[in-house]
């Protein structure tokens, strides 16, 4: 029993186990059909410099919610290089181990801005607030 525990602990150290899933953040999508992603994030919530919730009223009286953000000044060049590399492909925003949104990148994004406009969030104020608050906490 002790040997098994010791071996699993050693494997965990070698494999880099943290007891947590992947960090919340933006990732390169490696397979658009399955939303498989590169294990190394482009930027994580800890790299965000600003976040806000934007809302737009719809014709039917409902609201559409989007989390808009910007990466920290020190990560803007990394973000720009990553989005240039991903032009014509998808990147994805992973939150709590789930892919919330995987937009196609049309061009290099030099200003560090991004938007999280997930189908599951855009009509749900409470979910949007929950994600926003959790990401804001990670930024600290």
Image: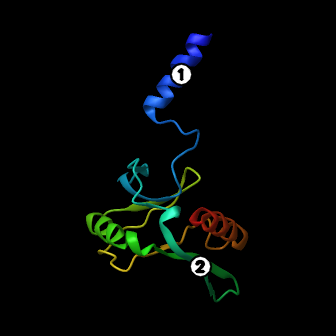
Image position, residue 56 (x, y; %): 61, 86
In the shown orientation, is residue 78 left or right of residue 18?
Answer: left
Q: Is residue 75 visible?
A: yes
Which label belongs to residue 8? 1
Secondary element at image label 2:
strand
> Quick one: label 1, few (<14), some, or many (20+) residues within 10 Å?
few
Residue drawn at point x = 65 percent, y = 70 percent: 128
Q: Residues within 10 Å of mark 2 (few under 14, many from 20)?
A: some
x 32%, y 71%: residue: 77
Asked whether the viewer can see residue 87, the reply is no
Quarter location, residue 132: bottom right
- What's the distance in space between the residues labelled 2 and 1, CA to CA? 42 Å
- Left or right of 1: which side holds 35? left
Which of label 2 and label 1 is nearer to you? 1
Give the image location of residue 47, x and y in percent: 47, 65
Q: Quadrant of residue 21?
A: top right
The scheme the figure's colours follow is rainbow
Residue in the picture at 33% in, 78% down: 110
Whether residue 122 is situated above or below residue 86 in the rendered picture = below
Q: Which residue is mark 2?
A: 52
Say if 23 sits above or below 134 in the image: above
Q: Quadrant of the C terminus?
A: bottom right
The earlier-in-sequence mark between 2 and 1 is: 1
Residue 35's place in the image compared with 100, above or below, is: above
**Position of the N terminus by quadrant:** top right
């Amino acid at each position: 029993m002790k040997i098994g525990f010791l071996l699993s602990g050693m494997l965990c150290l070698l494999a880099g186990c943290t007891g947590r899933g992947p960090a919340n953040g933006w990732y390169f999508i490696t397979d658009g059909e399955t939303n498989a992603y590169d294990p190394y994030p482009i930027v994580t919530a800890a790299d965000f410099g600003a976040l806000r919730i934007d809302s737009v009223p719809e014709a039917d009286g409902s609201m559409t919610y989007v989390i808009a953000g910007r990466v920290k000044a020190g990560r803007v060049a990394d973000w720009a290089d990553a989005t240039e590399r991903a032009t014509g492909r998808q990147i994805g925003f992973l939150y709590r181990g789930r892919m919330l949104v995987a937009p196609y990148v049309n061009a290099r994004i030099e200003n560090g801005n991004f938007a999280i406009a997930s189908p599951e969030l855009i009509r749900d104020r409470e979910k949007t607030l929950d994600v926003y608050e959790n990401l804001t906490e990670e930024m600290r």
